[in-house]
Image (spheres, rainbow, N blue to C red):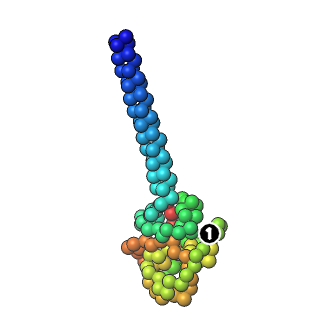
């Protein structure tokens, strides 16, 4: 009788111990998969820079964190033939309007990429003061003088 009772108690301890470990393992799997899903989702949303090729030269566009940028990135990849304006900028009127949050930056830096209105994409290749309002998309460091005439720009 003692032997049967001892076997029963040992069996219960083993079964209980295994089921708790299995539950803990399953909980960890759920937590890990949830964390991975969250990490993936966050990394999909937070694009901080994109590649830009202007006249066959590669640059990096450091992006702002705003709704306009989110919508712009969702349009990529895109290639534009951008026209010259004022000896300091290249522009294109896109087919799609984007959310705008315009403000007057008062000063434009060489390499700024902005949205004028809700569909005019502008790359500034010279610094200057301005009275116009824009929504900032990002900035290209070490941008060359883009010269006169239109240019071909690939956003990847």
Which residue is pictured at 38% across the width and 73% down the height?
Answer: 142
Instruction: Return the x and y of residue 137 as percentages of the image width and height.
Output: 51, 71
- Quadrant of the frame with the N terminus: top left
Is residue 78 or residue 146 the one in the foreground?
78
Q: Nearer the viewer, residue 8 or 94?
A: 8
Residue 122's quadrant in the figure?
A: bottom right
**How many discs mark residues in the rendered view?**
1
Q: Is disc 1 placed on a helix, strand or loop?
A: loop
Q: Mark 1 points at which residue?
A: 98
Q: Position of residue 145 (x, y in %)?
A: 43, 77
Residue at the image position 41 percent from the left and 28 percent from the top:
16
Toward which corner of the image does residue 27 lie, by quadrant? top left
Q: In which quarter of the image is residue 10?
A: top left
Query: What is the residue that sits farthest to the front in this orientation?
Result: 1
Q: Is residue 55 visible?
A: no
Q: Note whether residue 19 is visible.
A: yes
Q: In this view, does 108 lie to the left or right of 6?
A: right
Q: Which residue lies furthest to the top in this view?
A: 1
Tell me which residue sits at (61%, 70%) in the image: 99
Are there few (<14), some (14-19), or many (20+) residues within 10 Å of tag 1? Answer: some
**Observer-nearest of 13 and 150:** 13
* Residue 65 location (% of width, % of height): 49, 68
Which residue is drawn at the image coordinates 47% and 41% (left, top)?
30
Question: In terms of depth relative to the viewer, which is nearer, 117 or 42?
Answer: 42
Height in image: 107 above or below 114? below
Location of residue 3 in the rendering, given as x and y in whole percent from the top left corner: 34, 12
């Amino acid at each position: 009788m003692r032997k049967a009772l001892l076997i029963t108690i040992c069996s219960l301890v083993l079964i209980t111990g295994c089921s708790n470990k299995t539950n803990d393992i399953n909980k960890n799997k759920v937590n890990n998969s949830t964390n991975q899903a969250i990490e993936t989702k966050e990394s999909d949303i937070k694009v901080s820079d994109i590649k830009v090729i202007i006249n066959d030269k590669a640059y990096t566009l450091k992006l702002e964190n705003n709704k306009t940028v989110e919508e712009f990135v969702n349009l990529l990849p895109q290639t534009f033939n951008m026209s010259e304006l004022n000896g300091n900028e290249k522009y294109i009127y896109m087919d799609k309007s984007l959310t705008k949050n315009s403000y007057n930056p008062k000063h434009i830096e060489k390499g700024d990429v902005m949205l004028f209105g809700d569909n005019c994409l502008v790359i500034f290749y010279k610094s200057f003061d301005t009275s116009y309002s824009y929504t900032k998309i990002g900035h290209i460091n070490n941008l060359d003088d883009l010269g006169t005439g239109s240019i071909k720009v690939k956003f990847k």
